[in-house]
């Protein structure tokens, strides 16, 4: 038997609870993983609270991330004892997920846990941090180099934002963190932000072209925030958009793109190709300061993740939530 956060369909929507499940109930898959840590991401919070139709098959074990050790494998790529990490691929949405003590998955979904990380540290990174790295990789491929100018990170106190701040500053960029939580300014500066700005300056409707300021932008917020950020990007700069915390809309004009040669990159972590995942994890192991990673994560137990989901959606969680599935 193993413990898991199980989401059932109900007459009015869905309900999440801590359940005890039999290993025989695990889905088909080549690799059985003894999960050590998982995380609570924005998407997990939507699935647990039922606020958005994230879950596509019921009953579903929640959790879009896991880190742990291979227990059994029929895949030639993996053997018992291998340390692994998994993000997305439909985990916790259409395939039983990582907020559980056991998972069974296709071998192709797994990535080796970098030696630099413990399973807890890997989940302090989680999908949010791995997505922040995908954003950084997109901006680097665009040509962003330290010294190019200020790099804006929106939703900076959240999971994606806080890891992006830590990563970009370690890489030598001058990071400006946008947040609605002025009380977190000292924490954001300790993570590496050179300056902290009030998100209200970006979140209301703005002009299509504004004073040029940003060499690049990492945006996890969408809506007017992304539109304003694009309107303030310097000539031939770029934004990497990965989130919708303010909204899914994008009330912008083409002006920044056709008059300033601005580029907007879309970043998806869920179905990202395997080579890109491996590259992102290799870079995270190299470029993320372990002390800063420690300072942006707090650990909770499996059962606590039920209550923490609502807090996360209410913007009350700072940084990343690591879930100890044995805790
Ligand atoms: P968090 O909840 O941890 O962080 C989101 C942050 O956005 C909040 O902390 C807050 O930052 C800011 N925010 C929230 N509401 C608003 C608002 N109304 N207006 C402006 N800012 C707001 O979530 P994550 O960091 O885990 O995820 C962020 C987004 O990225 C989500 O939309 C998520 O779905 C998406 N995502 C996408 C992925 C992909 O593959 N494309 C992968 C991972 C996440 P502050 O308090 O500092 O203002």
Image (spheres, rainbow, N blue to C red):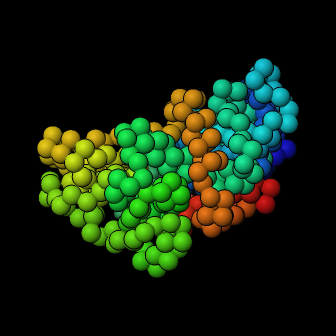
Q: Nearer the viewer, residue 30 or 272?
A: 272
Tell me residue 132's x, y (percent): 49, 49
> Could you tell whether 150 is left or right of 106 in the image?
left
Tell me residue 9's x, y (percent): 57, 45
Q: Residue at x 75, y 44 (%)?
A: 115
Tell me residue 68's x, y (percent): 76, 44
Q: Residue at x 68, y 45 (%)?
A: 66
Where ligand 1 lies, by image quadrant? bottom left
Q: Is residue 232 above or below residue 134?
A: below
Q: Is residue 261 visible?
A: yes
Say which quarter of the image contains residue 70.
top right
Q: Nearer the viewer, residue 142 or 264?
A: 142
Q: Residue at x 72, y 54 (%)?
A: 120
* Quarter of the C terminus within the rendering: bottom right
Q: Nearer the viewer, residue 224 or 112?
A: 112
Q: Residue furthest bottom?
A: 183
Say which quarter of the image contains residue 96.
top right
* Quarter of the N terminus within the rendering: top right
Q: Residue at x 25, y 44 (%)?
A: 236
Q: Is residue 233 above or below residue 190?
A: above
> Could you tell whether 195 is left or right of 270 in the image?
left
Tell me residue 6's x, y (percent): 67, 48
> Could you tell whether 191 is left or right of 222 in the image?
right
């Amino acid at each position: 038997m193993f413990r898991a956060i199980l989401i059932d369909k109900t007459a009015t929507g869905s309900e999440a609870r801590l359940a005890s499940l039999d290993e025989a109930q695990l889905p088909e898959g080549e690799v059985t993983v003894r999960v050590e840590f998982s995380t609570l991401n924005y998407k997990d919070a939507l699935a647990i609270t039922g606020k958005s139709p994230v879950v596509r098959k019921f009953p579903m074990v929640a959790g879009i991330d896991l880190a742990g050790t291979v227990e059994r494998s029929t895949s030639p790529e993996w053997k018992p004892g291998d340390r692994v990490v998994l993000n997305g691929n439909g985990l916790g949405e259409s395939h039983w997920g990582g907020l559980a003590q056991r998972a069974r998955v296709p071998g192709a979904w797994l990535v080796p846990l970098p030696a630099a990380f413990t399973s807890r540290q890997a989940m302090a990174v989680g999908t949010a941090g791995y997505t922040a790295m995908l954003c950084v990789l997109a901006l680097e491929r665009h040509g962003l180099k330290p010294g190019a100018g200020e790099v804006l990170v929106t939703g900076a106190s959240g999971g994606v934002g806080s890891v992006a701040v830590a990563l970009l500053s370690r890489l030598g960029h001058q990071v400006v963190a946008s947040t609605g939580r002025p009380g977190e300014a000292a924490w954001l500066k300790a993570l590496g932000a050179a300056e902290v700005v009030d998100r209200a300056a970006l979140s209301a409707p703005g002009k299509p072209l504004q004073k040029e300021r940003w060499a690049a932008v990492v945006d996890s917020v969408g809506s007017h925030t992304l539109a304003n950020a694009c309107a303030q990007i310097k000539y031939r700069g770029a934004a990497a958009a990965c989130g919708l915390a303010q909204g899914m809309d994008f009330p912008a004009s083409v002006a920044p793109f056709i008059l300033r040669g601005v580029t907007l990159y879309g970043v998806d972590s869920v179905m990202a190709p395997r080579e890109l995942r491996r590259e992102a994890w290799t870079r995270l192991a190299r470029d993320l300061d372990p002390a800063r990673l420690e300072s942006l994560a707090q650990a909770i137990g499996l059962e606590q993740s039920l209550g923490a989901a609502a807090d996360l959606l209410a913007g009350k969680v700072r940084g990343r939530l690591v879930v100890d599935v044995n805790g």
